[in-house]
Image: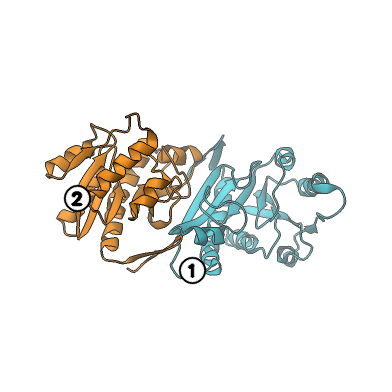
Chain colours: A cyan, B orange
């Protein structure tokens, strides 16, 4: 059983997809807690509906980013997770957090990294004029969306696409890919050596 | 009939694919000349075999890059092309060349741009650890592989891939994609407005 703490800032659709995968026995895991930097994140509601601890860690106290991340790390580690899963968590984790966590941190990004890191990846893709985009699950390192890639999925970008239609097409791949990767990880089938990630399928 | 001047530095496999597409009536075009910066480029041999003018423009005279590109541009424009096709041409065209040519310049790059521009794109892809790569046909602008994208094709990157095996998989897509794009262009079905390229399929 993979014990996960999920960090989320938004509607939590990837969190929902993880719940669905657990319910369907596709992912032998357990969400130990959902933690958000937004008091009103829908992701917290989804957790509460399942009687899963749902915590808000306030990023706007006067202890700065370092203080916030220390409180966040304490909150996460209290649940003794095997891994930390970012699901629409909209802040950059500092390198202190990443190193002190000492656990794998997963993220999913709505582009074929290294193209279009950072915010508004789907709008970036449309503006650039690529014919294909997709999503990337990667281990988090100190950079912004620069960590070792675990897996990717591709979608076409259509001539009539807007940011929203492309985001929807990518999101449905995200929902599948993230749970698949977490399931493979829970089965010990993902190995990382430096930047190189090997999946034993 | 699309009159093309092809610039090439190497073995000319994309040039061969263009010849094949012309022979099969998939591309209503004519290679008016092949011009290389390498005296011994195989691409020049392929042109000579077809009685097509094959020119070497020496980049190592003492007139600098500006002088070389002026001679190159004169050589190209003497054949009154409708467009200029880069097929493994291993130099960066200066912005003077791009603007003074006044004709569309096509390039094909062995990666899903904007990922992995510049040299050794396939090795870059393997080193980064992406799960998909491919090729991109784009209009050339003043940057390095930054011009408006016309079309792309995707290939998987396999765990056992080396630079060579990935390059071979991408190359077979290049051979199809480049001729397709040139055929669509010859039919007036590619329109460019700024960065936005529309294909009327």
Subunit bearing disc 2:
B
- Would residue B163 appear left or right of A185 to someone viewing this image? left
Question: What x and y, as percent, mark residue B96?
Answer: 40, 46
- Label 1, secondary structure: give it: loop
Q: Nearer the viewer, residue A49 or A87?
A: A87
Q: Which residue, given by chain and number where applicable, does mark 1 sit on?
A: A161
Q: Nearer the viewer, residue A201 or B13?
A: B13
Residue A84 in sight in this render: yes
Q: Quadrant of the C terminus of chain B?
A: bottom left
Neighbour tally class for label 1: few under 14, some 14-19, many 20 plus, Cα within 10 Å: few
Closest to the camera, between mark 2 and mark 1, is: 2
The residue lying at 21 percent from left, 39 percent from top is B55
- Label 2, secondary structure: give it: strand
| Rendered view: A7 above or below B120 | below
The residue lying at 12 percent from left, 45 percent from top is B50
Subunit bearing disc 1:
A
Q: Residue furthest right?
A: A62
The residue lying at 58 percent from left, 51 percent from top is A117
Q: Which mark is residue B72?
A: none
Question: What x and y, as percent, mark residue A96?
Answer: 74, 39
Q: Which residue, given by chain and number where applicable, does mark 2 sit on?
A: B32
């Amino acid at each position: 059983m993979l014990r996960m703490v999920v960090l989320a800032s938004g509607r939590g659709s990837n969190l929902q997809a993880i719940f669905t995968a657990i319910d369907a026995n596709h992912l032998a895991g357990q969400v130990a807690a959902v933690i958000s930097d937004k008091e009103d994140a829908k992701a917290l509601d989804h957790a509460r509906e399942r009687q899963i601890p749902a915590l808000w860690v306030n990023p706007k106290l006067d202890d700065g980013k370092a203080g916030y991340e220390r409180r966040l790390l304490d909150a996460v580690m209290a649940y003794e997770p095997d891994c930390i899963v970012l699901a629409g968590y909209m802040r950059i984790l500092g390198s202190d957090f990443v190193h002190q966590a000492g656990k794998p941190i997963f993220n999913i990004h709505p582009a074929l990294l290294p193209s279009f890191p950072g915010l508004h990846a789907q709008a970036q893709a449309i503006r650039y004029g690529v014919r294909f985009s997709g999503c990337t699950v990667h281990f988090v390192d100190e950079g912004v969306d620069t960590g070792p890639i675990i897996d990717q999925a591709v979608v076409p970008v259509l001539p009539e696409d807007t940011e929203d239609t492309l985001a929807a097409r990518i999101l449905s791949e995200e929902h599948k890919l993230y749970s698949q990767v977490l399931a493979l990880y829970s089965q010990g089938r993902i190995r990382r050596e430096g930047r190189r990630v090997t999946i034993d399928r």
